Image (cartoon, rainbow, N blue to C red):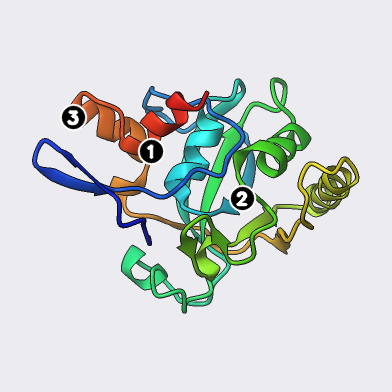
Amino acid sequence: MKHFTLLFVILGTVWTFAPLTSKSMEVSETIMETMPENAAVATFAGGCFWCIESEFRSLEGVLFTLVGYEGGELQNPTYRDITTGKTGHAEAIEIHYDADKITYRELLDHFLRKAHDPTQKDRQGVDVGSQYRSAVFYHNDGQKAEAEAAITAAQTDKVWKKPIVTEISPKSKFWLAEDYHQQYYEKYKEETGRDHVRVLFKKKNK
């Protein structure tokens, strides 16, 4: 992940940060322990997966999230592989949700209108490369149609000044990211007793 040169020193550790482009400032602080069985699933990509994961974990009806790599050809990719931008994968989030409490369209609208800037091509803020592209990986034809409709509606409503460049692609193999990436912000707070610097900036701008 590429970062600003501005640094923070916390407990002797140097931390860097990227700017937040999200319009949503809610941040989950609770670690989700158990992945539910047979829940509905949505898969999105929109920049650094730490950031995009945190945007959905606070929504009512979201039961569990996983971050990983999707859309590329390399088998068993690692985070080091992904950072080259040459594997074709995007940093993605898999969302397991209760469809009786939140619909796929509501997740799409949150993704396209609040969770990230879908007008940026192969980047999100200072994170640049195809691994940071905006994408919807649909699981069936119904999700594909809803994604197309949601993008059209967001553009018709002029949510953004620039055209939306979010890709709509069929779901492929979702490679689970390394454990330390999962629910990163929550683990950071549990281990250090304080919010990650990116979370602090989100709360500051609520």
Q: Residue at x 8, y 41 (%)?
A: 12
Q: Residue at x 36, y 57 (%)?
A: 3
Point out the residue furthest to the right here: 156
What amino acid does circle 2 point to? Phe
Q: Judging from the image, what secondary structure is the residue with disc 1 in?
A: helix
Task: Kindly report the distance in space between the C-alpha atoms of the residues bearing marks 1 and 2.
Answer: 20 Å
Query: x, y percentage for residue 134?
Result: 63, 57
Point out the residue furthest to the left here: 12
What amino acid does circle 1 point to? Arg
Q: Judging from the image, what secondary structure is the residue with disc 2 in?
A: strand
Are the residues at dot 1 and dot 3 in contact (C-beta closer than 8 Å)? Answer: no
The mark nearer the N terminus, 1 or 3, is 3
Q: Residue at x 54, y 35 (%)?
A: 55
Q: Nearer the viewer, mark 2 or mark 3?
A: 3
User: Mark 3 sits on what residue?
Assistant: 192
Query: x, y percentage for residue 73?
Result: 52, 77
Residue 183 seen in the figure = yes
Picture layout, residue 100 above or below residue 93: above
Packing grade of label 1 (10 A; few <14, some 14-19, many >=20) is some
Task: Kindly report the distance in space between the C-alpha atoms of the residues bearing marks 1 and 3.
Answer: 14 Å
Q: Quadrant of the N terminus?
A: bottom left
Q: Judging from the image, what secondary structure is the residue with disc 3 in?
A: helix
User: Mark 2 sits on what residue?
Assistant: 44
Q: Nearer the viewer, mark 1 or mark 3?
A: 1
Picture layout, residue 27 above or below residue 82: above
Q: Which mark is residue 198?
A: 1
